[in-house]
Amino acid sequence: MIKKILKNLIAVIITLEAKLILKRYKPKIVAVTGSVGKTSAKDAIATVLGQKFFARKSTKSYNSELGVPLVVLGVETGWLNPFIWFGNILKGVKLLATPKKMQYPNWLILEMGVERPKNMQRFAAWINPDIAVFTAFAEIPPHVEFFAGPESLVQEKMKLIQGFDQKHFVILNGDDKTLCEAKSKIQAKIISFGFNEENDLRASNYHITFRKEGEKEIPEGITFKVDYKGSSVPVRIFGAFGKHLAYSALAALGVGLSQDFNLIDISESLSQYKAPPGRLRLIEGIKNTYILDDTYNASPKAVHAALDTLEELPATGRKIAVLGDMLELGKYTVEAHKAIADRVIKVANIIFAVGLRAKFIGEEAKSQGFSSDNIFEFSTSQEAGRVLQEIMKEGDLILIKGSQGMRMEKITEETMAHPEDKEKLLVRQEKEWGKK
């Protein structure tokens, strides 16, 4: 009870400081929301704006009602340490008390998550962004269990732009059906992006690039072409994979164009973009294998995207899909996990189902004729990691993905070739996570 009271008190103080800091320094704000792809889009946008401005982005995924104020203050969570929280509060006081010449970012790129009803409504009451970016909505989005249904969750997220007019920009995924339907109701200037011809920013010729290492061709990244108002530029992203990354880059291009950046300059800056840990990064595994590490989190739409990437990437050995529970889906839990089976049996040679909910993936795969000898079920990521290590063979390509609560990064740690590099390659490597 005392911990909860203290947590609420800290949240009130930090949020009040954040509101006052925004009024004092008046940075321009990009708010990024959607069901999937928020973090990748936020990082790509920060890469573009950071070429010309002092820009600060949400660290990790500070997108909650406590996380966003932390970004405004420029501090990190204190976890359960009261001294760190006290220091964070003092940092806010300093920003408010110091003469205004104190350097503060020109731009804030804030990731805005919604977990409960009225979350976005409360954000919109004080964030007042200049630009809103909508990545994509999902038929079964994460956190939907706390809403009447997907439509209610979408309506909550759209409250971000309820006060927008022609002074504001909305950068949206024009390939997303829900966002296309919402366009006519938006009062702001719109830049749409995607692969469909109707978009303002249109991508095409997407493919994976490779580099030569002796006789082997190693996947290096992705490339695609972008057309905008008669001009065309190539975009290249290194070290990560998946068509969803093209959408993140397109969102960043849209933000840059809204500020009259040169299209070529934006394209060149995106070559510096680095996908964050746990987002479809290719990591060397033991026994001359490769791991497609997508362990940050999972939702149905994101799992399908990861499986698409597993299909796209070549492998001289087998393709193994290690899939953990997708959490916070409420009444859609069974349906969503069974739908994953429809896709994974077409892509993988071996399926690992990790967690009580993921068992529905295995059960559905068996019912559709997938060999039970190639389906392995586990209660925890630790169990799965030990068995995966035993069955891996040279040339295998392994996708590892699941919700944050499943701690799927532990499987990557168990099977990666260089565990000494885990702190820079894997998600959730802070000491506090290590205790969980």
Image: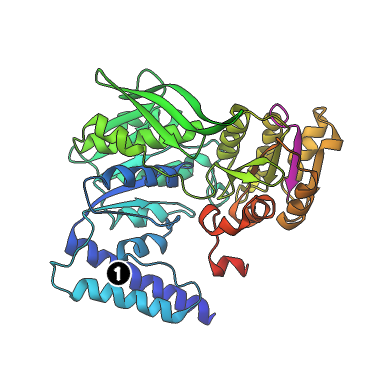
- Is residue 148 toward the left or the right of residue 228 in the image? right
**Where residue 78 appears, x then y in whole percent?**
45, 72
Using a 10 Å C-alpha cutoff, classify the residue at mark 1 as few (fewer than 14 neighbours), some (14 to 19) or many (20 or more): some
Q: Nearer the viewer, residue 236 or 299?
A: 236
- Is residue 369 toward the left or the right of residue 186 in the image? right
**Where residue 319 appears, x then y in whole percent?**
70, 33
Quadrant assignment, res 333: top right
Q: Nearer the viewer, residue 280 or 436?
A: 280
- Is residue 162 toward the left or the right of residue 25 in the image? right
For the N terminus, the quadrant is bottom right
Please give the residue where the numbered disc 1 appears in the rendered image.
Answer: 16
Please tell me which residue is depicted at 45% across the width and 80% down the height of the picture.
82
Query: Secondary structure under badge 1?
Result: helix
For the C terminus, the quadrant is bottom right
Q: Is residue 377 above or below residue 434?
A: above
**Where residue 386 appears, x then y in whole percent?**
77, 54
Query: Per the image, is 17 magenta?
Result: no
Q: Is residue 361 above or below residue 31?
A: above
- Is residue 415 toward the left or the right of residue 23 in the image? right
Q: In this view of the protein, can residue 187 be seen by the observer? A: no
Hey, what amino acid is under mark 1?
A: Leu
Q: Nearer the viewer, residue 273 or 189?
A: 273
Q: Is residue 91 above or below residue 109?
A: below
Q: Nearer the viewer, residue 131 or 201?
A: 201
Q: How is the image coloured?
A: rainbow
Q: Residue furthest right?
A: 373
Please tell me which residue is depicted at 51% across the width and 27% down the height of the picture.
208
Magenta-drawn segment: 345-354
Q: In this view of the protein, can residue 31 be seen by the observer? A: yes
**Where residue 72 appears, x then y in whole percent?**
31, 62
Please tell me which residue is depicted at 13% across the width and 72% down the height of the picture.
99
